[in-house]
Amino acid sequence: MSTRCSHSRVESFNRCPFKYRLRYIEGLDTIPNTEPDNALILGTALHTGIEEGIDQALDFYASSFPILTDDHIHEMMKLEALIPKAKALLPPGGTFELPIGNSDFIGFMDYLAPVDKGTFDLYDFKYSSNSKSYMVSGQLHEYKYFYELTHPGHRIRNMYFLFVPKVKIRQKKTETLAQFRDRLREALNGAEPWLEQVPFNLYKVVDFLTDVKHMVEETEFPKNPNHFCGWCEYEEYCQKGWDYMILPKNERRNLNATKKKVVWIYGAPFSGKTFFANQFPDPLMLNTDGNIKFVDAPYIAIRDTVTVEGRLTKRHLAWEVFSDAVAELEKKQNDFKTIVVDLLEDTYEACRVYICDRQGWKHESDDSFRAWDMVTSEFLNTIKRLVDLDYENIILISHEDRSRDLTRKSGDKISSIRPNLREKVANKVAGMVDLVARIVADDNDRVLSFKTSEVIFGGGRLTVRNKEIPLDYEAFCEVYEEANQRAAGAMKHGGNTPATPAPETADSGEQRPTRRGRKPKEEEAPAPDPEAVEDADRAAAGDPDIPQEQTEPEVLPKCPDGDRIFAQHNENPEIPLCPNIDAGHHCHKEGGPDACPLWDRPKTEEQEPTPMMDVNPPRRTRKKRDA
């Protein structure tokens, strides 16, 4: 929030602190009011007309609305009639819209008219018939005080409000539009603006400075319902609960400006996870296992708390403590920069206990149709709130689990390494974070590993080039920054998703890699000679004029069924290609096409099946003898 205060800010705070928070702290915009008597538009049009002229005032008013109705025309008639009368009351030679203030205050004087050398009269314009509320206002007193403070040798002699009356008459049901406008002109001819002098009162300035102190020190900003609510632009949001989505500005965000880190770290017990998290700046530990003896960060113990009041014993469950901590962190009324959850699986278990206690279950199996979904939803929603918090670092910590075995295609079993969390929940959490890292401890050597495979759990939004780094905060920041810059560069050039290659056909000169002939990925080599690439393509296509360096394609037989296989795949990509043939229809299967059970061979005479006998042959009937 800016430290420069204005009369309108303090006045808004005094009327309703909640409105002040929405407008000046949260900067919440509202849908513009298109009513003809919009006070802000009418007031600006009046100031424009007195300063620049009637035509400019009417142009501003008309351009402020998407469509003009008869009521808008009536307001323009009022401005056209009243502006010349108001301007005639002002002495000539003054300055309009003069800014005043210093590092603590800002304001704009509507009109400052010189009286003699160093002496001025101050005028402020009000489009209102109610002069009483303005006469007790401290606005002109504040302007005089801060102007004389910032302009030594200058003095404001007199202060005036210039009131321009609002003429409010309505069209009768018995009169035409022309008759109503004639009656409106008569009312405007009788309406006269007037000046009212305001005597200076230094206590008004003291009251203003006191209100500024209260405004700056306020933290709650409660609602204050009063008779001004009907004119408040936040009335529907505040009293009726209506909410509108505020669309962002249509401009690209600077991805490099994003400094928030969301990381999930797991590893074996006592591998240094909590110690590593303690190296992040200004951390707050949400600790579940009590392992905080060797770290100096402040912490909140996520555990059940029991209080005894007389004969009553009250238990506050661990999940309620965790939820309360997240709710308090959402207020952002603290100076922490890093939030650490240690351990994540313990919070999930606390969530299970909380849901079962709330529903009166002993286990999820008591209502298996809803129970697991309720636990998962409650847990993930709260973790999502935590991850979305506006802090520099969000660190999630888990133990690793090796108790689950994976069975490979060959039948071999191998232990998987993953966080100690339900698989479906773990996959959801991995989608919320930037990186999933594993701490590997070998005696006194500890590294932070970003490796991921079919047996090692990993992932995240960013891709790290260095798969292992020392368990050090500075090294982690370097790797994270590099990965973030690479991701931002990929998005800037159209995304990091590789383009889908065009479907290969039998005519294409490129040879499709086979499962048996696939080679390991080699280091990136210099760009090859275009002529060499062309010769290689022609050689792969079987051009006899090109010397063949590899003799394998010459001796491999072609699959007699290749045309049909590729034609089916091109018509319907869901039908897989045979894994034993390449783009040139060469068969890589041992024994060639003759040993392939999938070849649709043409049928020979020997293979023609013998015709089946009719199971119901026609019955033979005896001929009728001649008599």
Image: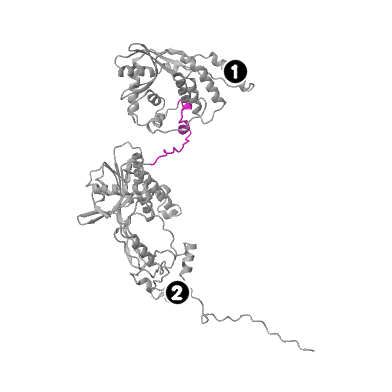
Give the crowd class for mark 2: few <14, some 14-19, many >=20 residues within 10 Å: few
Residue 526 falls left or right of residue 563: left
- Which span is picked out in magenta? 226-252
Instruction: Give the quadrant of the N terminus.
Output: top left
Q: Is residue 340 above or below residue 618?
A: above
Q: Which residue is mark 1?
A: 182
Q: Foreground: 12 or 3?
A: 3
Mark sitting earlier along the chain (2/1):
1
Q: Position of residue 608 (x, y in %)?
A: 53, 80
Amino acid type at mark 2? Pro
Instruction: Give the quadrant of the C terminus.
Output: bottom right
Amino acid type at mark 1? Asp
Q: Position of residue 311 (x, y in %)?
A: 35, 41
Q: Foreground: 518 or 433?
A: 518
Q: Is residue 516 above or below residue 234?
A: below
Q: Foreground: 362 or 249?
A: 249
Residue 227 seen from this side: no
* Res. 37 mark: none
Q: Which residue is mark 2?
A: 597
Q: Position of residue 51 (x, y in %)?
A: 44, 19
Is residue 240 inside the magenta stretch?
Answer: yes
Classify mark 1: helix, strand or loop: helix
Classify mark 2: helix, strand or loop: loop
Give the crowd class for mark 1: few <14, some 14-19, many >=20 residues within 10 Å: few
Residue 471 falls left or right of residue 571: left
Q: Is residue 176 above or below residue 250?
A: above
